[in-house]
Image (cartoon, rainbow, N blue to C red):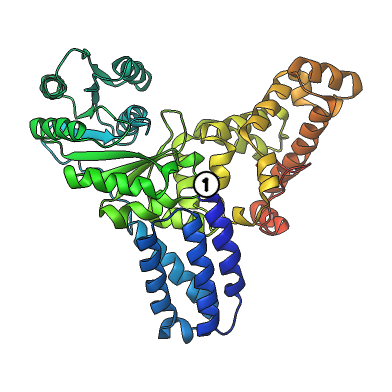
Amino acid sequence: MFDSLSERLGSTLQKLRGQGRITEANVKETLREVRMALLEADVALPVVRDFVDRVKERAMGQDVLTSLTPGQALVKVVNDELTTVMGEANESLNLNAQPPAVILMAGLQGAGKTTSVAKLARWLKEREKKSVMVASADVYRPAAIEQLKTLANEVDAHFFPSQSDQDPVEIAKEAVAQAKLQFVDVVIIDTAGRLHIDDDMMTEIKHIHDAINPIETLFTVDSMTGQDAANTAKAFNDALPLTGVILTKTDGDARGGAALSIRQITGKPIKFMGVGEKTDALEPFHPDRVVSRILGMGDVLSLVEEAQRKMDKGAADKLASKLKKGKGFDLEDFRDQLRQMGNMGGIGSMLDKMPGMGNIPAAAKNQVNDKELGKLEAIINSMTKKERQRPDIIKGSRKKRIAAGSGTQIQDVNRLLKQFAQMQKMMKKMSQKGGLAKMMRGLGGKMPMGGGGLPF
């Protein structure tokens, strides 16, 4: 997400960072570039206009002009104002209600609403330790009820059965009543989407809302529709008392216009964003962290939180103990590391959150992908246990057998062994006293990528 905006803003602001003097002329030129970058990202024009005016006003103020590093000060102004546009800080779900807390989901057809219901149910179970029931009041779309039933099983949520010949309002009321009987903490009601906003649709969802009085009414919107997403959200908000937005398909949105427009146009916060197809691909929306990603500064906080949640601490401790005892890092350990990366949402998700990724060419980023990680694991799996523990014995005939067994080429095996050798050196340095600091100094803040570099 935000790839093109990040690249454009990054190059524009980079010119300013080291400047010892800021003038009205170069502020004007910079803001012209910023304005074009935002418009190209499909941010709504009123949002762009207000943003540029606020940055200009602050940029010509004393804080920037009298700063010892005015270029850096101006970058901070852009950072602060972008964060303000998207809502300052994450606004969490309000579940402060007599159980069950009711969440009503609204949105257009094809926005990923039903999938978002399952993602949210999983998030509530895993992060908030809540019991969750889901119900479908979508009696129009073929197989909508079955789809939710399948997803509910996948995320281990209670499923309230409904039929396509039932009244949507009655389904919602009965689901809430059943959730009370079963002492469920949260019930999520999925509603019908339409291909466009129409009166019948709005009337039906208003009736459902009145019948169940949800504590949260979330609008699910496809981020790839750009500023149209914000306009659709506003139309829904005019008819329904929305409490927040779930922005879906952000992993496929290179522009980011929706994220930058919704808060200002609707006045409602983006509470979550969908970052992939799997049911665990839902993240709370933190405006400050998203801005950090846009400006190429990464999102280390989210990366650390994800690592704490998803990494196998036992395996990490075992590897640390092994290295401490002076035992070498072998290909089985390397395979474990690849699997850990897969658990953390894959290499793409990790790279997005790492500082400085905006400075790495797109071609280099494209070489480092989840498909490549799968290939590396297949090669290692094709080896014997002895070969994984002693890679130095892998010569000509063994390489040929490993390549054939993994469906790859001999050059792929050679590349893996080269990458592994580099990883082994890093691990050796890390196991020595003060090794991590030395290793980071050696890297000089740069990450080896592509070609013979490390796969992350």
The residue drawn where x is 20% and y is 40% is 216
Q: Nearer the viewer, residue 370 or 227?
A: 227
Q: Is residue 345 left or right of residue 442?
A: left
Measuring from the top left, give residue 41's x and y in whole percent.
Answer: 49, 54
In the picture as drawn, the residue positioned furthest to the right comes out as: 396
Q: Is residue 330 above or below residue 427?
A: above
Residue to which mark 1 is pinned: 254
Residue 365: which quarter of the image? top right
Mark 1 is on which residue type?
Ala
The residue drawn where x is 28% and y is 17% is 145
Measuring from the top left, give residue 132's x and y in whole percent.
Answer: 24, 26
Q: Is residue 196 above or below residue 178?
A: below
Would you call the spot at circle 1 few (<14 residues within 10 Å), some (14-19), or many (20 or more)?
Answer: some
Residue 188: which quarter of the image? top left
Q: Is residue 124 left or right of residue 281?
A: left
Q: Nearer the viewer, residue 15 or 436?
A: 15
